[in-house]
Image (cartoon, rainbow, N blue to C red):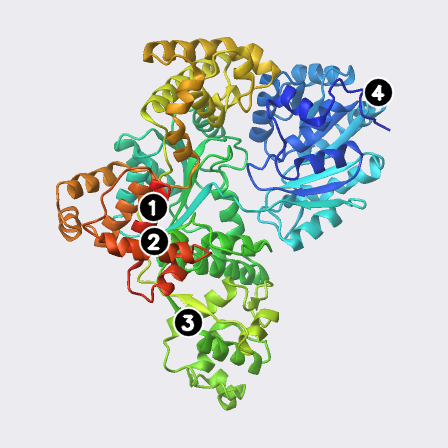
Amino acid sequence: MVSVAPSPFPSLETALKHFFGYDQFRLHQRAVIEAVLAQRDALVVMPTGGGKSLCYQLPALLRLGVTVVVSPLIALMQDQVDALVNNGIAATYLNSSLDGMTVRSRQADLLEGRTKLLYLSPERLLSENFWPFLTQLHQRVGIAGFAIDEAHCVSEWGHDFRPEYRQLHRLRTAFPSVAVLALTATATERVRHDIVQQLQLQRAEVLVASFNRPNLYYEVRSKTRQSYGDLLTQVQGLEGSGIIYCLSRKRVDEVAARLQQDGVAALPYHAGLSDTQRTEHQHRFIRDDVRVMVATVAFGMGINKPDVRLVVHYDLPRTLEGYYQESGRSGRDGEPAHCTVYFSYADVSTINYLIEQKPDPQEQNIARQQLRQVIDYAESTVCRRQIQLAYFGETLTAGCDRCDNCRYPRPQEDWTVEAQKFLSCVARCRERFGMVHIIDVLRGSRKKRIRDLGHDQLSTYGIGQERSAEQWKLLGRSLLHQGLVEETTDGFPVLQLNAASWQVLRKQLTVQVAIPEDLAGGEAQVDAVPSADQSTLLGQLKSLRKQLADAQGVAPYMVFTETSLRQMAQRLPRTQQTFSQISGVGSRKLAQYGHTFIDLITQFCTERGIPDAATHQTTQATAIRSTQSKATAPGHTHALTLDLYRQGHSLAEIAEQRDLRTSTILRHLVELIDAGTVVDINPIVSVAEQEEIARAIAQVDSGRLSEIHAHLQGTYTYDQIRLVRSTYRLRGE
């Protein structure tokens, strides 16, 4: 039995800092590591960027023997091994990209105990030729544990099922005493159960972290003829890297070519390119030689790039689970990032055509239901994050303030009576039908099926004729997203009542529905940037990082992540001790890069006349608070609005000059204030009105705009309330 090696570290936190440079564990990481060290099977569901890899990498360094990691993509394992080796950790991989001599050399290192982590594809692991070596490795050195990455591939209910993963249960038979750790970023309860069953995990600890990614901003925009211009504006205002997903190879090539013509360093990625081209494009993206990758959804699974700041679905995603996975490739370092979906019904037709090509009718039904869920997400007026989390069985009790529906809520109306009609109809139909049928009954449809079923004789037949079909559909979606009714997920979406449904029917709960003005998306929300000094230094630090990375032939983030560089720009460490306190600076990186980065920071401070880090930290306090806040920062379009406003133009005049809506101009002003810009709002909201709104804000505990608006009895608009709230926040009142 493999045991824990005698540790020179007094605590797990000490080992974490030594090897990886972090001071503390993220949520659930410590619990998983303790389970692994105790040789217990476990299933870990942790969102992208949550630190799954650390859950098996750190235990591997504290135990005798080799930890075998099963990874589905060559690019993914190469990327992780490069990062580990750059951190001074003995790791390697074996795959088809290596020649025979290299494979034999690496196997010899493994048998001599010189390697701690071995990455393999499931195909290589399960091949008959490799199995004897694996047995020999266990006998001579010991296998400390198996880590199955991207474990959702085991399940047919997962979004990326791979048949070869089904054979991994052979590990349990061949190595019954070796613990297995399964890891994935996305798994519904059904998928989690399937993973445990298929891998034959024994008394497995199932640890599910929150699926919430609070650093991501979600929005949906209507796709029009002008949408490419919107996309170009987003990309041109981007600080960092971006991924643009498209449905087809043709669309990928078209968008990439247009961006290149407009001066954007962008490359395409899809299955129509050769392996060599795809590999080259991927490497150039990872190493920051290009800023934007335009790709089909085949791209990204093997990319461990932490500083992606923008993910755009220029075409509609096919499933909510896939969208969560793809959008989650942004902001892996915990820094703010932006996720946009461009929505049009033309995309719906395209996806429906692709669904019709599936040979299995049941697969078609499930795919159509998944598509309906995406459409509901796109059209919904409910918090985007709330919908995503509910899909995975997680509840968000309040709005997130990090999506377009929460940031710019539509006016809400009390639709409790309509909800009672809707739910009563579901009950009268004996919870056997979907939303379209329920709406037909409510509106008194004369369809033959309604008559054949006798549903034209129900007491709820025709009681909803005062509302349009679209209004009833809006209510139905809202009830689903608020958890006030449920829908089956077997491809035949049948509505079913739950405990909350009966509370509505018994008048114990009221139902509020946000009423959309239209489906037009807002302007891009770009998160706050540092002050001028910090921004200049950050640019120099990035350039130095790129030089060092190119010299070593590795991706820049393997030198230091964006988070580490931002902390350097904020804290200005000028000694080995202070530099070691930066997140991501472990013993290896301190020795390898410390002097080089400290010299740059010291020179910068000398040129700017900054006497010491403490003094600079005080002068930069406001900028740091701005960076850490949820506020958005002004781009060029905001600056133009502010300039015209300060010249004395009215909101209507600015809107006319800029060919924008007045509501968009108001939104610009709110975002400017949120980013720390002082804006005189007296011409829009008088001082007396500001005081009345401020009192209402103070009296409403939840702070929700809709409740503040209701408290003021609709006297003031949502925009006026936003302006006052943002202004008072900026003043610290």
Residue matched to label 2 = 694
Give left or right: position of 387 versus 692. right
Q: CA distance from mark 3 to mark 1?
A: 30 Å
Q: Is residue 474 visible?
A: yes
The residue sitting at the bottom extreme is 457
Residue 153 against residue 98 in the figure, above or below: below
**Pointers 1 and 2 in contact (CB under 8 A)?**
yes
Residue matched to label 3 = 414
Say what secondary structure mark 1 lies in.
helix
Residue matched to label 4 = 140
Q: Quadrant of residue 406?
A: bottom left
Q: CA distance from mark 1 to mark 2?
A: 8 Å
Earlier in the chain: of badge 3 and badge 2, it is 3
Earlier in the chain: of badge 4 and badge 2, it is 4
Earlier in the chain: of badge 3 and badge 1, it is 3
Crowd band around label 4 with a 10 angstrom C-alpha radius: few (<14), some (14–19), many (20+): few
Q: Amino acid type of disc 4? A: Arg
Give left or right: position of 173 versus 463. right
Viewer-proximal residue among 395 and 45: 395
- Provide residue 495's location: percent of width, then percent of height: 56, 71
Earlier in the chain: of badge 1 and badge 2, it is 2
